[in-house]
Amino acid sequence: MIGLKLSWRYFLHRRISILAVISVALCVFIVVVVMSVMNGLVNEFKEKNHRFVGDCVIRASSLTGFPYAAEFIQQLEKQSFVHAVSETVQGVGLMTRPGSSWNVGIDYIGLDPVRHSQVTHFAQTLGYHADHPERAFQPSYAPEMDGCILGIDLILYRRPDTGQYDSPDRPWPTQRTISSFPLNPKGGLARAGLDMVSTKTFYYSDHSHSGLVKPDGRTIYLPLEQARILSGMDAPLVRSSTIHIRFADGVSVADGVRQVQQLWQTHVQSCKDKPYAEMLDDVRVLTWQQDRREFIGPMEKEQLMLTFLFLMLGIVTVFIIFVVFYMIIGHKTRDLGLIKSLGMPASRVAAIFLGFAAIVGLIGTAIGMTAGCLFLWKINAMENWLYDHYGWRVWDRAIYAIDQIPNAMEWPVLACVAAAAVAACLLGASVPSIQAARQSPVRALQVSQI
Amino acid sequence: MGHILQAKGIHKSYTMGKQTLTVLRGVEMSLSAGDFAVIIGASGSGKSTLLHILGALDKPDKGTIEFEGQRLDQMSNGRLNQFRNQNVGFVFQFYHLLDELNVLENVLLPAMIAAGPVGWLQCKKNVQNKAISLLERMGLNDRLPHKPYELSGGERQRAAIARALINGPRLLLADEPTGNLDSKTGHGILEVLNELNQQGQTILMVTHDDRIARQAGRVIKLSDGKIVS
């Protein structure tokens, strides 16, 4: 009782405790804001990547693709743990606009939009056919022509200030010509002479906004068979680049992928006497995280570095609290001597200062947490205000592919930050508190008399 | 009356850097219940050190101290804490009141330490009444909610005496209780101590002032770490 009372009174009567509270509050504020924004960015980025592919991806390591995908898809579709399957053909090419000298290097993906939408969130990325992916390759202005779905940045202008796209109500008549080198199963050019390059013109039927820089900025989606012809995967035997699998509800990615790997091994064995069976050796069965590792990895590394930086910040906080309490206890030598002379045990003396530290930690954390949450709540409004008044954008929407700064507060993260802040205060105060508790009362009383 | 406190062959020295300073050299003394004894001696003669050892604030290097049959020199720190809290009341030259607590809370401090968090809730009312009664006896009944820095030196020392008495100690130790006061105020404090002694309180006081010592029933003269009379 007296310990708690003294802890509270020391807190109220020491101006230096305000400095300690401010330092804790600032640290908590910074950690809450940066962690929330960073976690938001990473989680959003991961989510977008997951939505772009299936739970499991069977991927050829070469542009030549792999054969016998249809047989394996039939097998997969019989499995109860599989919800849907979609194959794609992928290649690289040159995109031009007929009648102009403009051209750009692109990746093209051939797919069946309906099947692919059952496996991924492809339909939701479409600008005009989100509810009718079966019509995604039918240009509304020329339904009989071969349509294409362009990555949104290949067709629409993104306003750098708002991050919004200037999008008309419907696709306008425009064409794109795709040229590609068809490859044979051995990886060589499939054709020679003037026929070496496959070229085909497609009509803009829709655009896809995945929120990922590369797919939105340099990918064009084509009907599966058209892409197969462009890439040379139509002959002499039909090939695919990937098979995307979505697992049934309740099936974990790890379990699903393990089962697919077993089935794939059986499939490879069953195909070993067929032509070009060796192409199956370079095919990998991956989780969606493994498939998107090249994109997610750097982000996760950045997050890890940030966590490390926060650890440093935590050490600085502990040191600040240590110094503050060292000073406070230095000024309280007389009180310590008196309290001990009155018979208070060392553990209760230490508890007074640890209680003081806990009060500093709790109040500092509460202030920092409140300020952090308020800041996050208004972060987009503040950023817009900065842009409106000073023309300054903290995050370039085009680079980060975000419409808004992520500001979702994760309660488990906030709870961890709060617990860590209070623990840091207790840790910082523990050494001087224990030293104080072990001090001889006579020594403390004599020091105060000097 | 029997001895309340008995010290035999008390030695104490301090090491300062490479030098060893011997403060007490085989002190022998005893106190009986109801005594008002004064330890007198020149500055640096070891008066305060002896008082601290007798009050279980410090341990002797050598020698034995018995308090009503209990050997203080053999007690653990935990037992000594309890012993000080229950049996000894301290009055210091510089009062040593806590500025963060008001006068009443300062007086209650030893009782709160003794009771512990749970026990305090049970005995709070009784102890508070006792503290108020002590403060009334000290003439501080209108100073209860004041902070120590709002009191005069004499008032602070009287509050410190009330604090020393709150747990009903068998022995009251006063280390130069008038040393920081003017003579008139100091005289008032001595009157308080005399009155307590007349009511049966055993008091051991340290002073370097012969005039104050003359008012005590018994004078113990310390010189060069030894009792000379």
Image (tube, grey):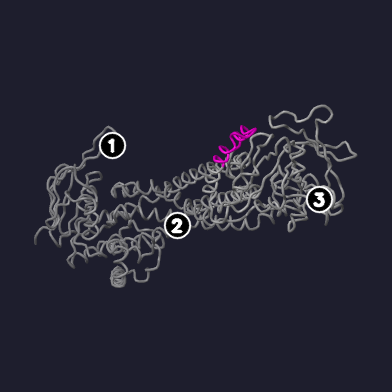
Whether residue A80 can be seen here: yes
Q: CA distance from mark 1 to mark 3?
A: 93 Å
Question: Which numbered mark, 2 or 3, is in the foreground of this view?
Answer: 3
Camera-side residue: A432 or B132? A432
Pointer 1 with pointer 3, Cβ within 8 A: no
Q: Which disc is residue A205 wearing?
A: 3
Within 10 Å of disc 1 (Cα), the crowding (few <14, some 14-19, many 20+) is few
Q: CA distance from mark 2 to mark 3?
A: 63 Å
Residue topped by disc 1: B16
Question: Which numbered mark, 1 or 3, is in the foreground of this view?
Answer: 3
The residue shown at (87%, 53%) is A141
The residue type indicated by label 2 comes to Ile
- Looking at the image, residue A289 sits to the left or right of residue A397; the answer is left
Seen in the picture, residue A22 relative to B140 is either above or below; the reply is: above
The residue type indicated by label 1 comes to Met
Chain to which mark 2 belongs: A
Q: Which residues are magenta?
A: A264-283
Which element is circle 2 on? helix
Whether discs 1 and 2 lie on one chain: the answer is no
Which element is circle 3 on? strand
Residue A325 picture location, percent across and down: 43, 48
Residue A276 forms part of the magenta stretch:
yes
The residue type indicated by label 3 comes to Ser
Which residue occupies the extreme top position in the image?
A193
- Looking at the image, residue B41 sits to the left or right of residue A327; the answer is left
Camera-side residue: A371 or A433? A371
The residue shown at (75%, 29%) is A189
Q: Main secondary structure of the magenta part?
A: helix
Which element is circle 1 on? strand
Residue A312 picture location, percent across and down: 51, 42
Whether discs 1 and 3 lie on one chain: the answer is no
Question: Which numbered mark, 1 or 2, is in the foreground of this view?
Answer: 2
